[in-house]
Image: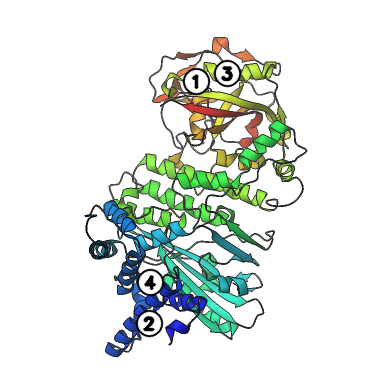
């Protein structure tokens, strides 16, 4: 092969087929390909086991078990391209001597890089490449998005193969805590836009980096491409593609992440910077200005992605808009099995189940040791349970918003209509506003003194159908106006679907008083569930009319509290501090607002503050939405 005569795109294709980096100038690409060819020729000459050099290389690199000399060559080339100042900076970052000539620095850095490769193959190279990547191109033709790392010439002329409802696109994941694995595998069958040629694309590596990739083909037969795709799928998962809906997880194999290919999505080429705003921005709209501002806050997919990534979810691996209900249910199911094992001192089982959870619900741990992330305590279990709950709300939200994103006209108004909730802003000088503000101020607990809260706006809210369902509880005694807080990511789902009870798949031990909807009479107890932070100060809470009736009062956790004693309508977890009921306000319709100042109650239970739980969502009627900003003390 006359390498020098190849064009840049041809060089990149050759390198891509070998699983090598395709970045850099033409001289760099020529050097890289030349080194690879020399190595292949050497391997071919010495091979005596019947395997070609290419197959050896593919096997080793896919398993991630050997340190390829290709990676070492690439690392040396990278250092050779740097100036002496860059080399010294690299040396300083690695904690090695930054003095000497350029040649000495390259030798020193190359040696240090080889040590790195033994622990984390290709980590530095791939992390550097991902940081250098300024624009990620996600090209969508048909139902599925082409992998972002496909060569541009392939993206321009190919699409993901689809036959009827069958879309040949697979995202696989494998997390094994004991072996410190957290890796992905992409398989896509591609069809040329004119239908004359077919290819199969694979990409694999540790979650959070580009990894390695390879193109197979072109094939002139569609069946050949499908056969290659299905064989690779089986080789990696031990499941047949045709029966993937009944997927069975196997040890040391990849798990298939089921995607939701929304039919309403329009064909588009989207070029986005990694941190760009994917949500909608306020614009010309027929909505009242305060309502428009609120809708733009809660219907922002960029915000949802950012907040989920902050708590560990890998939204790049399994995009929020592609979340399927079955994936979320699988996440709940694994947590349920973890809950059964916690407390049994079976570390190996917890490691295995934690790996299973991270396989189903992808996380980006970088190159940290996986054993640091074993779900081995009730607190960690609760944290992951809240993550899956948030993903469940986002699954609802992204489907609701998907049809409107980027459309002409008035998307804010369209989003508002899809919530099926009427929002009416309260004026600051109104009695209702003053009542809510007083309730907030008086019930901000002393133990939550690390922040203060400012009211941004308050809305009176009426959810479609809720009053009709609540009618049978209108005459129930003991109806109270109570707080409910939740992550910013959850409000599109909450307003459109109402407050909901955890599904059967969720572990009961994640809920102190059983699976129900939880409320508080102390503002700051509910405010904590907004999970606001210094970097994300906005929060949203509800005030709901809750038909409590006769309550089963409990002083400590009871996971089956949803099995109420006869005649009881709700559960009350009795806390040590509560609003003074002698200062409560009763509204005209008989609803009690416990807005009195907090006082210590004489009891011997486990709870600091009261909790109220109902197990029938018909006992809930939303009254007010409160948008706030948190001010955290340093």
Mark 2 or mark 4: name the one nearer the start of the chain: 2
Q: Whole-percent x and y of residue 561?
A: 48, 34
Which residue is found at the position 72% from the left and 33% from the top? Answer: 289
Viewer-nearest residue: 137 or 320 = 137
Pair 4/3: label in front: 4
Give yes or no for contact between labels 2 and 4 (Cβ–Cβ under 8 Å): no
Read off the residue under disc 2: 54
- Left or right relative to 351: residue 164: right
- Left or right relative to 475: residue 211: left
Q: Is label 4 in a helix, a strand or a loop?
A: helix
Q: In 3D space, how far apart are the residues under numbered discs 1 and 3 (Cα atoms)?
A: 9 Å
Residue 62: numbered disc: 4
Which residue is found at the position 42% from the left and 57% from the top? Answer: 208
Give yes or no for contact between labels 4 and 3 (Cβ–Cβ under 8 Å): no
Mark 1 or mark 2: name the one nearer the start of the chain: 2
Viewer-nearest residue: 230 or 14 = 14
Read off the residue under disc 1: 444
Give yes or no for contact between labels 1 and 4 (Cβ–Cβ under 8 Å): no
Mark 1 or mark 4: name the one nearer the start of the chain: 4
Q: Whole-percent x and y of residue 601?
A: 44, 15
Q: Whole-percent x and y of residue 352?
A: 34, 56
Check disc 1: other Cα within 10 Å, few if <14, some if 14-19, many if 20+.
many
Q: Whole-percent x and y of residue 506?
A: 48, 46
Q: In 3D space, how far apart are the residues under numbered discs 1 and 4 (Cα atoms)?
A: 55 Å
Pair 2/4: label in front: 2
Mark 4 or mark 3: name the one nearer the start of the chain: 4
Mark 1 or mark 3: name the one nearer the start of the chain: 3
Q: Is label 2 in a helix, a strand or a loop?
A: helix
Read off the residue under disc 3: 439
Which residue is found at the position 51% from the left and 28% from the top? Answer: 630
């Amino acid at each position: 092969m006359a390498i020098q005569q190849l064009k840049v795109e041809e060089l990149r294709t050759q390198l891509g087929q070998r699983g090598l980096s395709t970045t850099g100038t033409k001289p760099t690409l020529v050097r890289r390909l030349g080194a690879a060819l020399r190595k292949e020729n050497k391997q071919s000459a010495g091979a005596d086991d019947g395997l070609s050099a290419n197959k050896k290389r593919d096997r080793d690199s896919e398993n991630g078990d050997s340190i390829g000399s290709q990676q070492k060559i690439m690392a040396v080339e990278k250092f050779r391209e740097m100036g002496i100042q860059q080399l010294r900076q690299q040396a300083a970052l690695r904690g090695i001597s930054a003095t000497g000539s350029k040649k000495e620095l390259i030798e020193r850095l190359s040696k240090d890089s080889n040590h790195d490769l033994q622990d984390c193959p290709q980590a530095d190279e791939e992390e550097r490449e991902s940081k250098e990547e300024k624009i990620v191109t996600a090209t969508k033709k048909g139902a599925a998005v082409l992998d972002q790392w496909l060569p541009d010439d392939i993206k321009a002329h190919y699409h993901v193969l689809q036959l009827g409802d069958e879309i040949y696109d697979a995202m696989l994941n494998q997390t094994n805590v004991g072996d410190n694995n957290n890796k992905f595998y992409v398989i896509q069958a591609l069809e040329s836009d004119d239908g004359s040629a077919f290819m199969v694309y694979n990409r694999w590596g540790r979650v959070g980096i580009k990894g390695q990739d390879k193109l197979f083909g072109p094939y002139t037969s569609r069946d050949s491409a499908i056969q290659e795709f299905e064989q690779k799928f089986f080789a990696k998962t031990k499941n047949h593609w045709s029966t993937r809906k009944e997927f069975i997880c196997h040890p040391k194999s990849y798990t298939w992440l089921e995607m939701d290919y929304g039919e309403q999505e329009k064909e588009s080429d989207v070029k986005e910077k990694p941190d760009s705003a994917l949500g909608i921005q306020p614009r010309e709209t027929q909505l009242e200005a305060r309502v428009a501002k609120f809708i733009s806050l809660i219907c922002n997919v960029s915000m949802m992605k950012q907040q989920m990534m902050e708590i560990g979810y890998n939204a790049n691996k399994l995009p929020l808009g592609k979340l399927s209900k079955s994936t979320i249910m699988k996440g709940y199911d694994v947590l349920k099995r973890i809950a059964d094992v916690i407390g049994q001192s079976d570390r190996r089982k917890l490691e295995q189940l934690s790996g299973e959870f991270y396989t189903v619900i992808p996380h980006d741990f970088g190159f940290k040791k996986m054993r640091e992330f074993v779900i081995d305590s009730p607190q960690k279990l609760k944290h992951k349970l809240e993550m899956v709950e948030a993903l469940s709300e986002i699954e609802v939200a992204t489907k609701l918003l998907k049809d409107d994103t980027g459309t002409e006209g008035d998307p804010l108004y369209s989003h508002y209509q899809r919530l099926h909730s009427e929002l009416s802003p309260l004026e600051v000088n109104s009695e209702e506003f003053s009542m809510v503000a007083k309730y907030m101020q008086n019930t901000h607990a002393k133990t939550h003194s690390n922040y203060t809260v400012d009211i941004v706006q308050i809305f009176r809210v009426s959810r479609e159908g809720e009053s009709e369902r609540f009618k049978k509880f209108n005459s129930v005694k003991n109806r109270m106006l109570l707080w409910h807080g939740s992550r910013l990511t959850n409000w599109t789902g909450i307003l459109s679907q109402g407050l909901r009870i955890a599904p059967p798949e969720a572990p009961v031990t994640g809920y102190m008083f059983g699976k129900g909807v939880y409320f508080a009479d102390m503002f700051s107890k509910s405010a904590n569930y907004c999970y606001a932070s210094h970097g994300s100060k906005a929060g949203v809470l509800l005030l709901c009319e809750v038909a409590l009736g006769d309550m089963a009062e409990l002083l400590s956790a009871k996971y089956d509290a949803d099995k109420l004693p006869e005649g009881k309508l709700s559960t009350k977890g009795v806390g040590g501090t509560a609003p003074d009921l002698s200062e409560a306000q009763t509204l005209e319709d008989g609803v009690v607002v416990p807005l009195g100042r907090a006082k210590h109650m004489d009891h011997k239970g486990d709870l600091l503050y009261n909790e109220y739980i109902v197990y029938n969502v018909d006992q809930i009627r939303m009254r007010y939405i409160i948008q706030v900003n948190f001010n955290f003390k340093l």
